[in-house]
Image (cartoon, grey):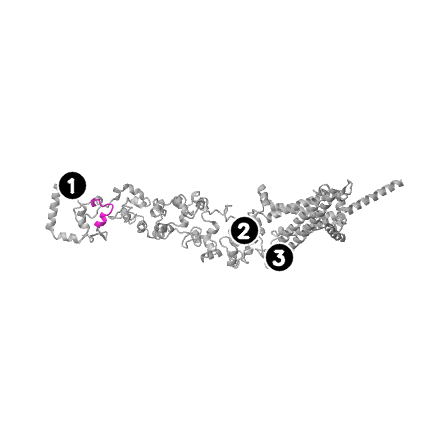
Amino acid sequence: MALKSSSYEKLRCFPNILKFIQTLLVIGLVILPPKIYAQSNDDCLMCHSDNELTMEKKGKEISLFVDENVYKSSSHSKLNCIACHKGFDAEAMPHAENIQDVKCVSCHQKDLTKHSFHPQIIKSKGLGKTQDTSCKSCHGIHDVMKVNSSRSKWNQTNLISSCGYCHKEATEHFVNSNHGIAFKNGDKFAPNCISCHKSPITRSAFGDKIVDKKIAQEKLCLSCHLDDEDVKNRTTPSTGFIHAYDKSVHGLALHIEKNGDAASCIDCHESHNVLKGTDSRSTVNRLNIPNTCGKCHSAIQSEFSESIHGQLVAKGNGDAPSCTNCHGEHNILRADDPNSPVAFQNVSREICSPCHESVALSEKYGMSANRYKTFSESYHGLALSGGSATVANCGSCHGVHNIKPSSDPTSMIHKDNLVKTCGSCHPGANETFTKGTIHVTLEKDDEPILYWISTIYISLLFSILGGMFLHNLLDLIKKSKIKKLKQLGHIREEKHGHALYLRMTVNERIQHATMAISFMILVLTGFMLRYPESWWVSHIRDIWPDAVEYRSWIHRIAAIAMILVSLYHIYYIAFTQRGRQLVKDLFPTLKDFTDAIGIAKFNLGLSKEKPKLDRFSYVEKAEYWALVWGTIVMTVTGLLMWIYIDYIGVFSKLDWDIARTIHYYEAWLAFLAIVIWHFYFVIFNPDVYPMSLAWFKGTVTEEEMAEEHPLELERIKRKQAEERMKSEESSDEV
């Protein structure tokens, strides 16, 4: 060891003085007590107070200067130098080359365990040779201070800079983070380096036990954000929001599956540069989220970056959806979880609709605000709302992470790609199959033919049903008034016999029952599809959970039954005498027109005489021929929709939309006509109330015949009289 010092050189110039001093030291050692002759700090400082005192070690020049003032103000000021610096001959100057390293643990053995966050320090027992593995690198050498001292490196005010001496990058991040800013501002609840690193949570501490490390890091974060009431009350996240992580796809993967790749707090929020989501620099800022998620989901991120949403996010558009807008944050669930917003049955309603139904966003970006509405009213949308697990949702056609506008040649909904997109569910689809507007509306500018069909039907619904209602209301008022007057004796009530008259044969009643049952099933199952979320459908699903699943099959079976009974009826009216007479009697005549006017005048009080009606009144004839028309229309349109998928390429989507529109409005027209027209005359009509049982028994009373079919009654009685007369004449001849 080569000692270099100006003081030492001066001493060598006075050899006699040096020998004198040595002699005195020897005498002192022999005569004086140990307390006196032990080397003091002043003795050491005779040389080490020289700020130019240096030595050469391993090719480097190092300072041996000790600032007396600094040392005297340190925690070790009452200790002699030799209390720490041991294992050398103090009289030998220069000292021995290999001086024993100072062992802090000789006094601070228990304190060493407190530094578990630095495993290297424990391993080296504080004697580490590198900057970050020894006691002195953190606590200093001769300037060791108590923590409560403002000059201590580990005082609250100096803590961050002390750690930053070695951990520069981490410190820079922390200082600018939410935690660092709060700590700087004196927030007593703000974490610092030690409060987080007091336990070993680093890669070096856990080695290849990645799962254990992540769980330890998670517990550390939750110790404040979940377990500390003071912190929890002062931070934005709620308890439920944070707890949701445990049941998320990430939390389950980490805790249950022990998957080290699962994201935990630090993976998303990072460790030292934790920033609020509103900060543009934050890793959880919605504009930065794709990159954060992309650290694990790189393939999806690459796909998303090319989508219309990803491109808008990259441009800093705050309206564009990012990963968390669809998947959630702490509460991310698997896509096959029925509670997940991106689950097959939920994605259209919960994810796509909020933006694509927004009037504000539609006006801002020139989009249509009815995309979800038109989808929800389509067969796909209705079936999806009804619980179908196979029908298409928004993602089926538009894509999931790769959504692009229809103008993009790579888009799934580009005109050149529609056949392939539709063909993924409908094998054999061709260009004819895809012709027609997808998100079709009934607006004139969208599909004129659908507009006119709906307009005509709506006009018919209001005019025909309104006319029926008014007709029946006047009829009800008039008949009720007459019945009341008869009860009061103001009108003489005619006496009638007890004879029963055949109205419907067994054959006709079976036809009627089959038609009625199939019609009601068709109405019920058809409207179940059209209104899947209505209260009565909910009740049906509560009683029979699989009702929606089997709805289509029940609907088709009922349709087949109606078609078969209709075909049999054609046979009946064509090849049986009673059937032919039935059609003849049901055929409209001029008398029906005059009867309708006469009834209207009678009910309005404009005429005192009520027209006499025959076997079938204009009411029943209108019912019959409306049923014929409705059955034909519903059969044709229903079969077209049914075979549309089986005969792909024959019919276009526009053809299907036309059939569907007609089918829908015709169903409403038929249903309401039955309720308003047929049910009134069979049930609520005062002449037959509470119900005419002709459909069940096949017969009606003479009183009912007299009120509803007087001409037929007169004809029957006249025929009976003629037959009686003939019988009497033949008896007289005999």
Q: For marks 2 and 1, give the CA distance.
A: 95 Å
Q: Secondary structure at mark 2?
A: loop
Q: For marks 2 and 3, give the CA distance.
A: 25 Å
Q: Amino acid at mark 1?
A: Pro
Q: Are marks 2 and 1 in contact (CB under 8 Å)?
A: no
Image coords of residue 425 (percent x, y): 56, 51
Q: Amino acid at mark 3?
A: Tyr
Q: Are marks 2 and 3 in contact (CB under 8 Å)?
A: no
Magenta stretch contains residue 81: yes
Q: For marks 1 and 3, give the CA distance.
A: 116 Å
Label at residue 423: none
Image coords of residue 33 (percent x, y): 14, 40
Label at residue 34: 1
Q: Secondary structure at mark 3?
A: helix
For label 2, count other residues whose C-alpha is less than 10 Å away and answer few (under 14), some (14-19) or many (20+): many
Image coords of residue 257 (percent x, y): 44, 43
Foreground label between 2 and 1: 1
Task: Please give the residue where the numbered disc 3 appears in the rendered image.
Answer: 451
The reply, left or right, for residue 226 in relation to residue 358 is: left
The mark nearer the N terminus, 2 or 3, is 2
For label 3, count other residues whose C-alpha is less than 10 Å away and answer few (under 14), some (14-19) or many (20+): some
The reply, left or right, for residue 178 in relation to residue 471 is: left
Q: Read off the magenta span.
A: 67-82
Task: Please give the residue where the numbered disc 2 appears in the rendered image.
Answer: 393
Q: Is residue 69 visible?
A: yes
Instruction: Tell me which corner region of the image, top left, top right, bottom left or bottom right, holds residue 442.
Output: bottom right
Q: Residue furthest right?
A: 733
Q: Secondary structure at mark 1?
A: helix
The mark nearer the N terminus, 2 or 1, is 1
Q: Residue at x 78, y 43 (%)?
A: 494
